[in-house]
Image (cartoon, rainbow, N blue to C red):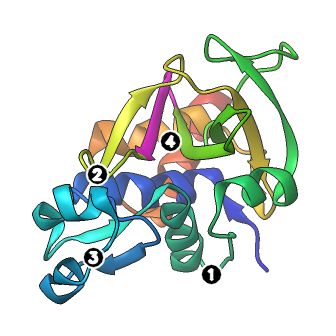
Amino acid sequence: MPNISSSELIAQFQTALREGWGYIYGASGEIWTQAQQNAASREQTKKYGQKWVGHRVADCSGLFAWAFRQLGGYCYHGSNTMFRRYSSASGSLSAGKRTDGEPLKPGTAVYKFNASEGYHHVGLYIGEGAVIEAKGTAYGVVTSKIGSGWTHWGELKGVDYAEKGEQIAMSHTIFGFNCAICLRLFDSVVRSFHLA
């Protein structure tokens, strides 16, 4: 499996955010249909799912599974297993900061944990204190703050965190870029100015 850059992963999540994706439990990027809504059995889907008919939908880990597929990779669809088996490095967060004192890198998965459900929710840290998450059926794909209840972090296997993630990740939002090639080009330009 080829390594995916953290900026490419962030760009996929930003696409879902910009396109106004919805949340349906068990989904990973498909378009939600009226027939699926009519057949829904989960209470939250029955209550809020109608507004997502005709939209792409994913649940929290399904958004990761979809993003990895778009980039030629694989990510398990399930937040507990993602944290336990698909993290190359992991640890705890306190007030949005890693407890080991190291910086939280853009493109890192962040999790919410409780004793009864384990790592029950996952989002993607994109830098500047922001997380993109598929929050729930009532909300869809939204941004939140890293200090808003995220308890753990995990750098995912198959993701390259060695790049200048913070600078690259935020650059395409500022200038409207939406592709990995544009991000790499922008990073090359920035590096050439720093070297000059």
- Left or right: where 185 falls relative to 150: left
Q: Is residue 141 visible?
A: yes
Can you give x and y, in whole percent of width and height, for residue 117 in the image?
Answer: 67, 43
- Main SS, magenta region, reads strand
Foreground: disc 2 or disc 1: 2
**Residue at which label 2 appears:** 140
**Residue at which label 4 appears:** 169
| Amino acid tagged 2 | Gly
Judged from this view, the residue extending furthest toward the bottom is 35
Foreground: disc 4 or disc 1: 1
Label 2 with label 3: CB-CB less than 8 Å: no
Q: CA distance from mark 3 to mark 4?
A: 37 Å
Secondary structure, mark 2, is loop
In the displayed structure, 96 sits above or below 31; it is above
Label 3 with label 4: CB-CB less than 8 Å: no
Secondary structure, mark 3, is loop
**Residue at which label 1 appears:** 72
Boundaries of the magenta span: 127-133
Can you give x and y, in whole percent of width and height, for residue 99 in the image?
Answer: 82, 15
Instruction: Assign the N terminus to one quadrant of the image.
Output: bottom right
Q: CA distance from mark 4 to mark 1?
A: 19 Å
Residue in the foreground of this view, choosing between 165 and 15 = 15
Secondary structure, mark 1, is loop
Can you give x and y, in whole percent of width and height, for residue 19 in the image?
Answer: 22, 60
**Residue at which label 3 appears:** 40
Crowding at mark 2 (Cα within 10 Å: few <14, some 14-19, many 20+): many
Residue in view at x 57 percent, y 32 percent: 166
> Counting residues from the N terminus, which is met first, the one under dot 1 or under dot 3?
3
> Counting residues from the N terminus, which is met first, the one under dot 4 or under dot 1?
1
Crowding at mark 4 (Cα within 10 Å: few <14, some 14-19, many 20+): many
